[in-house]
Image (cartoon, helix red, strand yellow):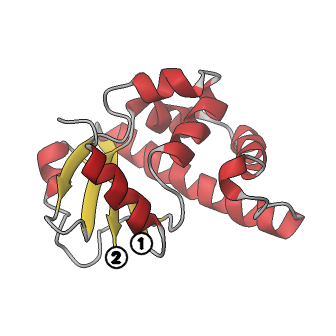
Amino acid sequence: MARLSALSVVCLTVLGMGAWMDYFSAADDAVAAGQLDVGEVPGAVCGNGIDPAVMMGTLEALLTGRTYDDVRADPRQCALVAQEEDCAVVVTTLTDGVRDALAGASLSDLRVAAAAWGRTEEFNGEFDGDEDAGELAELVEAFADLSREARSAGHHLYCRISM
């Protein structure tokens, strides 16, 4: 499994602008790679605008108390699983650390983490109000549900980014 190349980082940056980001679980990288060219990923959580590298890394840091640099050092943090040649679709890993942190967090801890996450610079103040913060908390809770299912099945988490 390779870390993202410079080309892939450029692809993710371009794709992040108006891209669809589906977070899903799979038994392994080969199964996850099979989601590269399917229409809808079964059981996926729509996380449009939530990039798997920086934003999910920040969420993991908030939930675990690890530094962002420690999270980034994990070999599964946004490692490339598969990509189309034109970068129209990319599948990356998420760490088992974020899966386990989300799966093991209480509802209260998830809401606290979501509120702190919404105040990070990556969100550019998008989640300042109570209503907006509630929407982000619902997304974090959906990630937690996905993580619980993945952990109980012995699966890993992935993100498919597509134009």
- In the displayed structure, 144 sits above or below 77; it is below
- Residue 119 can be seen in this image: yes
- In the displayed structure, 47 sits above or below 154; it is below
Residue 34, numbered label: none
Residue type for callout 2: Met
Helix, strand, or loop for circle 1? Answer: strand
Q: Position of residue 81 (x, y in %)?
A: 20, 47
Q: Is residue 58 left or right of residue 158?
A: right
Q: Position of residue 27 (x, y in %)?
A: 21, 44
Q: Quadrant of the C terminus?
A: bottom left
Crowdedness of circle 2 by 10 Å Cα count: few (<14), some, many (20+)? some
Disc 2 designates what residue? 163
Q: Which residue is drawn at the image coordinates 69% and 57% (left, top)?
A: 123
Residue 157 figure quarter: top left
Q: Which residue is drawn at the image coordinates 38% and 35% (left, top)?
A: 77
Q: Which residue is drawn at the image coordinates 38% and 25% (left, top)?
A: 74
Disc 1 designates what residue? 20
Instruction: Choose the circle earlier in sequence order: 2 or 1.
Output: 1
Helix, strand, or loop for circle 2? Answer: loop
Q: Position of residue 69 (x, y in %)?
A: 53, 24
From the viewer's perspective, is the residue at label 2 or at label 1 nearer?
Answer: 2
Residue 2 figure quarter: top left
Residue 88 figure quarter: bottom left
